[in-house]
């Protein structure tokens, strides 16, 4: 089982560039999430999805967009990258709303210079 | 007041010590409480979960929830160097449109 796969693992962007962080899960989970983790700040929810075609904003959605066209994939789009978006991004999935254990990917380390 | 408060540490203990990690919260709607462990440069992984108040034990780990005080704890007995990691508490009210809310994490170092 691959679980949750995130690509790329590392990326350096210049200010104003755009990119898509990929996330794929093979557990047939309905719920998927994007979090960002900054040093000493814990995990902040960016966007989440409760199923294909349904997405909603989390705590820190500004500067990001998502789509969920299939159960497996939940890409995160960064438009016009800014230094404040330098962070580690984690994608997670769960089989239910409660989240008896989110399964996390290994993260994408993004630096915006 | 933040919804979930967790002392980031760092916390350093010798091998074999008993470790106590804690979180407080303000939202009385939280019903599900979890502890995640995160090794350096890895994604978090679920360690323990508890529903409502009470204790749960799994090997060297014990999770406690006191809803009346809005306080949760994770105890690690006979701590090992392999326990060195960041521990994040997480909570969920299990309401439509919600997701897990995480504490900032406590970094633990166990020296041999």
Image (tube, rainbow, N blue to C red):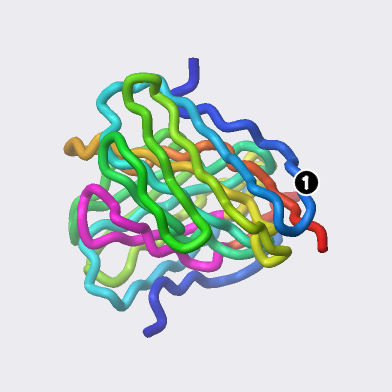
**Numbered disc 1: what chain?**
B
Count of marks overlaid on the render: 1
The one nearer the camera, A48 or A65, is: A48
Above or below, A91 against A23 in this view is: above
Q: Which residue is mark 1?
A: B12
- Residue at the image point whose x is 60% and y is 65% from the top: B42
The one nearer the camera, B86 or A88, is: B86
- Residue at the image point whose x is 41% and y is 71% from the top: A4
Residue B51, quarter of picture:
top left
Going by the image, does B43 lie left or right of B27?
right
Name the residue at the bottom extreme.
A1
Could one spot residue A14 in this view of the protein? no
The spot of residue A7 in percent (x, y) is 52, 72
Q: Secondary structure at mark 1?
A: strand
Above or below, B87 against B46 in this view is: above
Could one spot residue B12 in this view of the protein? yes
What range is drawn magenta here?
A89-107
Above or below, A59 against B12 in this view is: above
Residue A71, quarter of picture:
bottom left
Name the residue at the top extreme.
B1
Going by the image, does B69 lie left or right of A88?
left
- Residue at the image point whose x is 48% and y is 42% from the top: B89
The one nearer the camera, A62 or B7, is: B7
- Residue at the image point whose x is 41% and y is 82% from the top: A2
The spot of residue A80 in percent (x, y) is 57, 46
The spot of residue B77 in percent (x, y) is 59, 54
Question: Where the C terminus of chain B falls, by quadrant?
Answer: bottom right
CA neighbours of label 1 inside 10 A, class few (<14), some (14 to 19), many (20+): some
The spot of residue B104 in percent (x, y) is 58, 37
């Amino acid at each position: 089982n691959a679980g949750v796969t995130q690509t790329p693992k590392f990326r350096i962007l210049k200010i104003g560039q755009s990119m898509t962080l990929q996330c794929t899960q093979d557990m047939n989970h309905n719920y998927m999430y994007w979090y960002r983790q900054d040093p000493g700040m814990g995990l902040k929810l960016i966007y989440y999805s409760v199923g294909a075609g349904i997405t909603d904003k989390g705590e820190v959605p500004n500067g990001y967009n998502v789509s969920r066209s299939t159960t497996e994939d939940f890409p995160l789009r960064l438009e016009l990258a800014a230094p404040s978006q330098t962070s580690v991004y984690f994608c997670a999935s769960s089989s239910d709303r409660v989240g008896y254990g989110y399964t996390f990917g290994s993260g994408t380390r993004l630096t915006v210079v | 007041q933040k919804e979930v408060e967790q002392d980031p540490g760092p916390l350093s203990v010798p091998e074999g010590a008993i470790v106590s990690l804690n979180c407080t919260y303000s939202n009385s709607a939280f019903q599900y409480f979890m502890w995640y462990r995160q090794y350096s440069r890895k994604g978090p992984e679920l360690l323990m979960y508890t529903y409502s108040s009470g204790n749960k034990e799994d090997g060297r780990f014990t999770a406690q929830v006191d809803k009346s005080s809005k306080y949760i704890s994770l105890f690690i007995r006979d701590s090992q160097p392999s326990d060195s990691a960041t521990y994040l508490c997480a909570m969920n009210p299990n309401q439509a449109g919600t997701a897990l809310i995480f504490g900032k994490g406590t970094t633990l170092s166990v020296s041999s």
